[in-house]
Every structure is written in structure tokens, then in C-alpha cells.
Amino acid sequence: MTHVFLGMPAAGQGNLHASEPFPQAAHHELGKPQLRANLRHATHTIRDKRLKVVGELPDWEELRDAGEAIKNFSMATLEQRLEEFEKNFTAAGGTIHWARDAAEANEIVTALIREQQVAEVVKVKSMATQEIGLNEHLEAQGIAAYETDLAELIVQLGHDKPSHILVPAIHRNRTEVRDIFLREMPEVDPALTDDPPRLAEAARRHLRKKFLSAKVAISGANFALADTGTLGVVESEGNGRMCLTLPETLITVMGIEKVLPSWRDLEVFMQLLPRSSTGERMNPYSSLWTGVTPGDGPQNVHLILLDNGRTRALSDRVARSALNCIRCSACMNVCPVYERTGGHAYGSTYPGPIGAILSPLLTGIEAEENNSLPYASSLCGACYEACPVKINIPEILVHLRAEDVDARRGQSKLPSQMDLLMKGGSWALGSGKHLGLLEKALPLGRLAAGRRKKIKQLPGIAAGWTASRDIPAPPSKSFRDQWNAEKRSQ
């Protein structure tokens, strides 16, 4: 499911900083005012639409509770649900493959494509295939994978990376899209304008040949229903329907956490997902298929069930609820950090608040630059309030920050500045007498503030605070001194 916003008149191209920690990458992105304007426009547009359609339902909070309960039950009984799904999917003529990691999944997909003796495939938008780097792997094997979702197509032709779960090309404007199409589509009309309908028509003409000639399609899945062996994809453009019905061979790559217990559960998620993601009451296209139907649709149907760190995440009792995510991106559209930095700053397949917890959970807090992601948040809690399945993202962020601190502590025998500050804070706040001694140093703080009565620079780790704000001069008397003086005067 995806949208593309083509309404903004201008924007700067986003540079990728995947090899940098979030603070450094975010610093680069913050230097692009037009990018921030585009992000604000798109996220606020989706946010406002969502609030309107959510407000129409008197039982929205009950739906959120139901979604949370269903996902929690699915994760608590994941082994049974997966076995049930495999049994029913196989009985319906489909073939199941299990992949422990990205390497295994990529090899399975490559082998299945080679069996069909083709050198190109069409794709439905899929976070799982982005996660495992499938397109890059296939390219190295001499196989071309064509994205058919409009926003993903823009990103692919622009030799770029997605910046949003729902709106991958959120960082591009319509003028840039026109330039990309003129440069990368040989058959496009040289007189192409940046009018959105003209751009959509150019993409449609470009993709039509791919749809009609493709023998193999690759998809992800939004849901898997254990009791029937059914897979489901929801999308907004119809490209998914073309990929899921026209080719002879269909290969789906899906994270194991997408399984739901029963068909009836769709009643809840088909209300939660469209309202939370695109601000729509229902999905324009909802495709459901159960194995193979003779004479109708793909006759060679495969599903790769991907672990790639999900069982690792499941073992974390505090953070396992991150696997409940239904990829709606509601958390991103309300996040003040994401709105200003965009998705490229996260250097992850999953940007925004959910990416800040999911990436460290899947590959470990110590892997690559994951240890900076849990700090990419103000902990305002807006993501938790917007999440349709009530994932407590702030709580998990704090949990992962603690894991990061513990991991760093084991790397050095010497205490860090933060360790010393916390020790000092414990000493000061652990006794009224200790706090009273520190309060006697208030005049020194006023002296450091100077005539302007502002402290503009602190040393060491505290310099990060004063880098973007001033500290007002402390009062001449502490609260306790003022309180005691007031009591004496009565």
C-alpha cells in the first residue's frame, strides 16, 4: 500500500547517509529547508486525513484494543500459527520455503526465477524485499527487478532509497519526477510536463509492457491467515493486482510476524490499516489468494517465510510488541523528529519511530549504527497514541537505550561521563543534606551566567545541551531556602 505526493513545486534531492550514525546523517538532512517543507506538507496532509476518518468511528479505541489483542495472541502462539498456515497453504497448491536470514531468502528467490529461465521480474511494493536487499542481489545475478508501484518506481529510476514506509518518494517533488522520467524512460514524450496526471500516465505506459510480458512476479504480503492458508496484499494503484494475477509464477516474501489466526481477524485490520495509513475508509485494491486456483491466476505459487532476526526480537519480552507493526506509517506522520529529518537519516529499511526500534531488534543494538537509532526521538508519545495496534514505542525506545548503555559499559573498564553524572545525581538526590550542600553553589552558577543571566556553554557531555539552547541563571536562593524563610516570617 503506497501513496505518492506530487503537489509540491520544488524540493532538494535527499542524499543518503546510511553509513553514518543518525545524529550526523540527520544534521545533513536538516540543512535542506525545501526537503523539510515537503516532509511537513506530506505528513500533515496524511495526518489530517487520518484524524478525520478515525473520528467517524465511535469504536476506534475498541478497534485498537482488538488489533493489539489479536497481534499479541499471534505472537504468543506464533509457532502453532505458522504450522497451521503452512499446512493449509500447501494443501491449496502453494509451496512454502523457510529462510533464516536475508542470504537464504535471496538465494531461494534467485533459484525460483532461474527455474523459469527469465531475466526480468515485476514487483509489488514490499518492505521485506527491501529489508533483504533483493533488488540489489538480483541485479548482481543478472536479473532485472522492475518496481511497479509509482513511488517505488520513482525511487528506483532515480537510483535512490525510499524515505517513508507509505510514501517512498516523499522527498521528491513533481519537477524532479519529470526529470527522472525524461532521463530514465527512453520511450517517454520529450514534451512531458510535471502535471501529476501526465506523470502518472507516463508511468502507466512504461509499466504496461512489463505487466503484459512478465512471467514471474514478486510480492510481499500484508497478512497471512492461518486457518485458510490465505495471503493478502492491500494497495492503492492496482499495480499489485496486475502482478498477482497475470504472471504464471508468483513468489511472495513475507516476515513470519505477518500471520494472523483467522479470516475473521481481517474485519479488524481492514478498518485499522487504511484509516491509519492513507486516511481512507477502505483500501482501493485488496487482493487475497489461497494457493493455486486451476485456470485462474498464477499456477506456480511460492511463499518464502522470512525470519531475519524476528525470533530474536520475539525473545525480548519488553520489546517484542514491535513485531505487531502493520506497516501503516502512522507513527512517522506524527513524529516531530521524522518530520524534520526524513527517512534517509535513519539509514534503515524502516525509518521513523518504528524503525528506531525495529532495526535494533532485528539485527542487534550493537550492529552497524543501530545504537544511535533509539535516541532519534523526543519521547513525546505521539507515535504511541497514533499506532493502530498500540505499540508502546516510547517504552521500547527507553528499553533499547538501556541496552545500549549496558553494551557500552562492557566495552571499557573506565566509567563514562554519563556514568559519573548518574553517580553524582544519585549522591545528590539521595540525601537532603547532600542536596543542601550543592545548593550553596548557586552563586557560582549566577557568576558563570554573567550579565546576560544565561549560561551558553557547558563542558563535556553537557555541551550537547547548550549547543542548541541557553540555560537561565539559577536563582539567588534555592526553593528550600525560600520556603524556610517564608515559614519563619509567618
Image: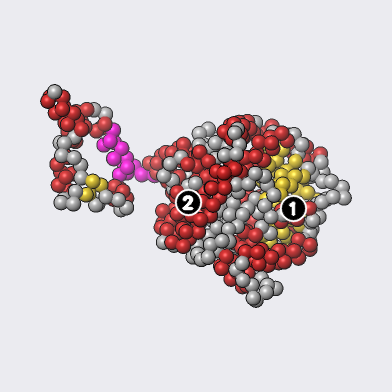
Q: Quadrant of residue 78?
A: top right
| 472 left or right, relative to 62 | left
The image quadrant where one finds the C terminus is top left
Q: Position of residue 179 (x, y in %)?
A: 58, 71
Can you say whether 20 is above or below 209 in the image? Answer: above
Q: Which residues are magenta?
A: 411-426
Query: Which is more N-terminal, label 2 or label 1?
Result: 1
Can see residue 103? no
> Residue visible at 67% across and 74% down?
189
Q: Position of residue 377 (x, y in %)?
A: 43, 46
Of residues 453 and 143, the one nearer the viewer is 453
For badge 2, the amino acid type reads Tyr
Q: Position of residue 249 (x, y in %)?
A: 78, 54
| 251 left or right, relative to 478 | right
Can you say whether 95 is above or below 487 in the image? Answer: below
> Residue visible at 79% across and 63% down?
213
For badge 1, the amino acid type reads Arg
Label 2 packing within 10 angstroms: few (<14), some (14-19), many (20+) = many
Q: Describe the element under mark 2 as helix, strand or loop.
A: helix
Read off the residue under disc 2: 338
Can see residue 191? yes
Residue ranking furthest to the bottom: 190
Of residues 368 and 182, the one nearer the viewer is 182
- Let me know if residue 46 is in the magenta part: no
Q: Quadrant of residue 260?
A: top right
| Residue 241: image tag | 1
> Residue visible at 47% across and 52% down?
339
> CB atoms at circles 1 and 2 under 8 Å apart?
no
Count of numbered circles on the image: 2
Of residues 293 and 404, the one nearer the viewer is 293
Q: Position of residue 422 (x, y in %)?
A: 31, 37
- Let me know if residue 425 is in the magenta part: yes
